[in-house]
Image: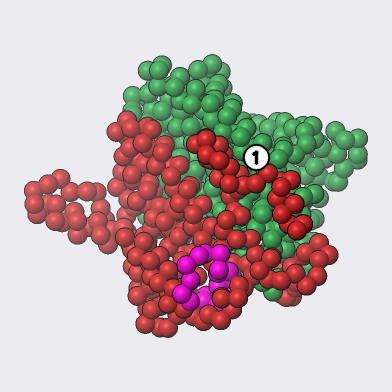
Amino acid sequence: MLLKNALFLVAGCILAQAHINSLDELGGLGRKMPVTFAVFLFAGMSLAGIPPLNGFGSKLMIYEAAFEGGHYMLGLSALMSSLFTLAAILKFAHTAFMGQLSERASKMTEAPMVMLAPMLLLVGASIAVGLFPGLLLVPIAHLQTGLGLEPVQASWLGGLPGVSSYNPLVMTVALVATGLIGWLYYRLSGSRHVTSYIHTGGGVMIPNARMHLPASALYETPERLIRLALRDKPQVQDPQTESHAHDH
Amino acid sequence: MTTDTLRTLLTVLVFPGGLFAMALGLALKGVERRAIARLQRRVGPPLIQPFYDLIKLMRKRTLIPDTANAFVFLAVPVAGLASMAVAASMIPIPGFYEPSTGLGNLIVLFYLISIPAVSLMLAGSASGSPYGAIGFSREMAIVLAYEGPILLSLVAVALHAGAVTGQPILLSLTEIVRYQQEHGAFLFDPWMWPALLTYLCFIPANLGIAPFDIPEAESEVLEGPLVEYSGPPLGLMKLMSVTKSVVVLGLGIALFFPNGPAGLAGLFIFLAKCLVLVLAVSVLKAAVGRMRIDQAVLFYLKWPELLGFAGLALVIARF
């Protein structure tokens, strides 16, 4: 709930800055709207179930419940579906926020503070609940005992209830600690950062729009296979007619 | 609580995650390079060449493309490496090391193993290079193709281990290993062979080994997501991929053939098994060329998927 809302607000921020109706009109927004991009990446990765973020904990409990209850196929489909979420999130991230600036995107600026604040609030809440699931679970357990139900296992610093002993706090601490190894490697190297042009294989003066891979060009192979499975007419032209089209 | 946390930190930072896993990965990479060189009748680099490479990359400048998203570009190698260091600490070394419980079970490990692929995709996307974007698109295609089979394989093992220990499903890797040590490895159980074959099929695609090194194809897309990387970030990317090989091979050993003596000998047996697997991988790498992305995706959706379903069906039918 926290994450989906944050994503809606991100979409709202982009729409408020430029009235577009196709993802392909965007590109490179990450450098123009860094805060919006950070919120999108956090909420998106969390939604795709990247540990230790908030979305992963809830997914884990659903999978375990499905497998424990003997619904293997449901559990497997749920596990696979989070992969498709990831694909969608990354596609959006690439087309809107990464790569070359499009004509529309180059005129855009960061959203005003009144639009950023609610998103940051939601992200903050998501981080808090993600790190300390007890924040919600302990009051729920109290309510359950009050109503005479069997309460869920919960403590302020504890992990998630269920068969696994996954504790998001421990996982976060572990990931941050090992992240320090990489950070230390950067620090020790003292490497100088130099801005460079991207490698184009010798091509010069290629307009930005031609260098940005649009949303429709990503994931061609899976898309073609799905169309094949559905016996749909392939949307992707075969290479020969396509190269002809480019020649003219 | 505090001693537990300290122990967990030590396991993720030093042994068997963190530094140990990275050093082991680099050493195995050295073995792999030497083995491939010998198969191609070359002399090959010294065994510690990957360590030299890491130090060399550390002393280079960091080139950041003007179209790149600099923060994401520099942060994803760190995140990928961190996830692999933690994942390595979650793999039990039979008879020698049991992972701490706070980090979670097989499902958590499965998700951690998918983080380096996410890092690679974000890296290619963030670099702003069209080659990187193509690499990202290919990586996603192949991830979508191999993730189904590996899930089927993991679930088959967990269900089997659960059935024989009288639970619906056994997701704790430590207990799967313990069961096999007492009752014999799944490797010698013909009912588990489809699941084992599925796992073996998953290894080359996940580690980016020929014939499935399509996202990072040097000759077509100039190493795809890595095309704009240089210096320390490239070093971290390489470190991430070698650590991932330790995690993936170690998980395979834990799932199907964890048996070994207790104590320090258990560690050496584990290392020997890793070595055998790496040599097998080198032979594969030297023997075959690269597939096209649609061939590889179709291959994974056909055979390993079928094997995975067969493995799962066998396990369910047996009990």
Chain in green on the image: B
Q: Is residue B142 magenta?
A: no
Amino acid type at circle 1 is Asp
**Horizontal and vertical percent position of residue B307:** 54, 25
Chain in red on the image: A
Instruction: Write the residue at 71% across / 34% down.
Output: B281
Residue A244 visible somewhere in the drawing: yes
**Horizontal and vertical percent position of residue B180:** 49, 25
Give above or below for A141 relative to B192.
below
Q: How many marks?
A: 1
Q: Which of B157 and A107 is in front in this view?
A: A107
The quadrant holding residue A97 is bottom right
Chain of the residue that carries numbered disc 1 in the rendered image: B
Residue of label 1: B294
Instruction: Write the residue at 35% across / 69% down.
Output: A122
Give above or below for A180 relative to A82.
below
Q: Is mark 1 on a helix, strand or loop?
A: helix
